[in-house]
Amino acid sequence: MMAALTTRFLALVLVVLAVVSRVYAQDVADGQGHTVSLTIERLRQTHVLRVGYGTAAPFSFTNANGDISGYSIDLCREMAEEMRQILQLPEIRTEYVFRTPANRLQLLNEGGMDIECNASTNLPERRKAANFAPAHFFMRTRLVSLKRNNIHKLEDLRGKSVSVVLGTVNISQILQLSRERRLGLVTVPVDEVERAFELVNNGSVSAFAMDDILLHEMIARSGHPQDFSVSEEGLGEPAAYGFMTRINDPEFADLVAKALWRVYRSDRMQKIYDRWFMQPFGEPPHCLNLPMSAELRAMMESVE
């Protein structure tokens, strides 16, 4: 009886391991010593690229017509066309997958999406769980607050509350600075960027810590931008945004990088950037008036 149970248990373990292997193994050998990307193979068979998007305008968001839109989305569309040409496919269709900061890595590495085209910060700890494409933007974490609260730097928040978004680097930044400076900050974690900003807008928290570009965009379309203030002090050094792909599929990551470099070096790049940072967009229409940074321009002109 015990032997039979043991045999059944081992068989169950083997089945579970097989399922796990199918879910997580994205880069395998083809039997001849060559590496085969399962993501690329599926792309060849289905002609469908699953793109993760979010609620982080101007990078990726749902517009008034219900369409997925944004700077990151435009770049990924151009990238997909370059991938189609590289792989010599008749077409590549885009299938959009909604993700949040909290579930993006799980969706990516469990196969729910092939690439996240949004605004994820390229950090050493994240590179342990995902591959990052060449940067498409540079930002710095800052604080947004209502002007009447007179918050210009982190010290002005001593003993007060700060909203943060789950799954972002801003949480660890705030907690570390609070400990180092003995500020006694109270963090209020939420799932979405828009919700964290609304907590500032309605006075539920004193400030919101987030990437400065996202803060400026939310302020611009708030309907009363004159009521808000962005801190002069940055929390940490400038950091790069990059599209994320599965950690265990370096072949697909290489394909993404190659396709993106083609876009970056083309005359389309400046037009895509200007559409989202130098021209009005959204509802209500608003303009960020943010020229391409020296860091981004230098990166895109560098030799890959």
Image: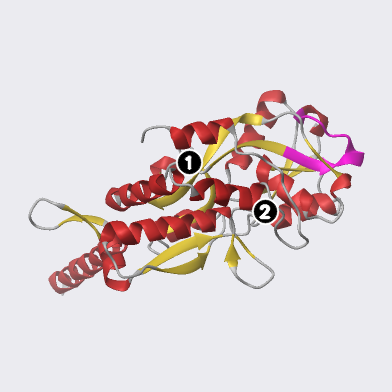
Query: Residue at coordinates 13% horizontally, 51% vertically from top-left?
Result: 34
Crowding at dot 1, Cα within 10 Å, few <14 / some 14-19 / many 20+, comes out as many
Crowding at dot 2, Cα within 10 Å, few <14 / some 14-19 / many 20+, comes out as many
Residue toward you, 54 or 168: 54
Is 149 within the magenta? yes
Which region is colored magenta? 143-154
Q: Tell which residue pokes out farthest to the front in this image.
A: 267
- Using the rendered view, name the quadrant where residue 113 is placed: bottom left
Residue toward you, 221 or 160: 221
Q: Taking 192 as reference, is 264 above or below it? A: above
Left or right of 62 in this view: 253: left
Q: Taking 244 as reference, is 69 above or below it? A: below
| Percent x, y of residue 205 | 81, 47
Is 257 within the magenta? no
Query: Residue at coordinates 52% horizontally, 38% vertically from top-left?
Result: 240
| Percent x, y of residue 171 | 62, 41
Q: Tell which residue pokes out farthest to the top in this image.
A: 181
| Percent x, y of residue 134 | 43, 42
Left or right of 274 in this view: 17: left
- Which of pointers 1 and 2 indicates the residue nearer the eye? 1
Q: Taking 268 as reference, is 4 above or below it? A: below
**Residue 204 is at least partly visible in this image:** no
Q: Which residue position holds label 2?
A: 193
As shown in the figure, which amino acid type bears the numbered disc 2?
Answer: Val
Dot 2: element: helix
